Image (cartoon, grey):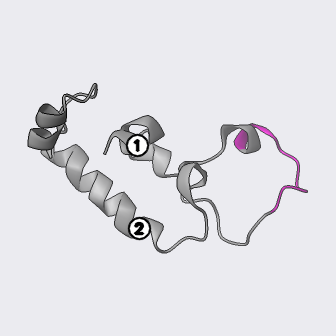
Amino acid sequence: MNQAVEEERCKCRKFSLEEFLIGLALIIGAAEFSQKGVDLFGNKELLDDDDDDLWHSISASPRFDQYMPFSRFKDL
C-alpha cells in the first residue's frame, strides 16, 4: 500500500500496519449495514440533534469514525 502511495506521489501520509488493518476491517464491516459512504461514519448534525423524528432505522449507525476518520478512510 505504501509503495503505491509513493509511486503515485499521493499527498497523503503513509499507512501504518494498524491503520491498514483497521481500514480493511471497516470495508468488510460495511457489508453488514444498509448505509453507504460517509453515512457509515456518523452524521454529526444528526448526533447533535435530539429530535426523535429523525429515526431512519432500528439499527444504530455503525459510527466508524470512532476507529478511523472519514478523510483517512478516503485516503485508503
Residue 69 screen position, x and y as percent: 43, 38
What whole-number distance in Å separates the C-alpha atoms at marks 1 and 2? Answer: 16 Å
Residue lying at 45% horizontally and 45% vertically, measured from the top left: 66
Local crowd size for mark 1, using a 10 Å CA cut-off: few (<14), some (14–19), many (≥20): few
What residue is disc 2 on?
29
Residue 72 against residue 1 in the figure, above or below: above
Report which quarter residue 9 is drawn in. Answer: top left
Residue 24, located in which quarter of the rendered image? bottom left
Does the magenta segment cover residue 49? yes
Magenta-tinted stretch: 47-55
Left/right of residue 47 with respect to residue 24 in the rendered view: right
Badge nearest the viewer, 1 or 2:
1
| Residue type at the position of mark 2 | Gly
Q: Secondary structure at mark 2?
A: helix
Q: Is residue 59 above or below residue 67?
A: below
Nearest to N terminus: mark 1 or mark 2: 2
Q: Work out whether 57 lies above or below 51.
A: below
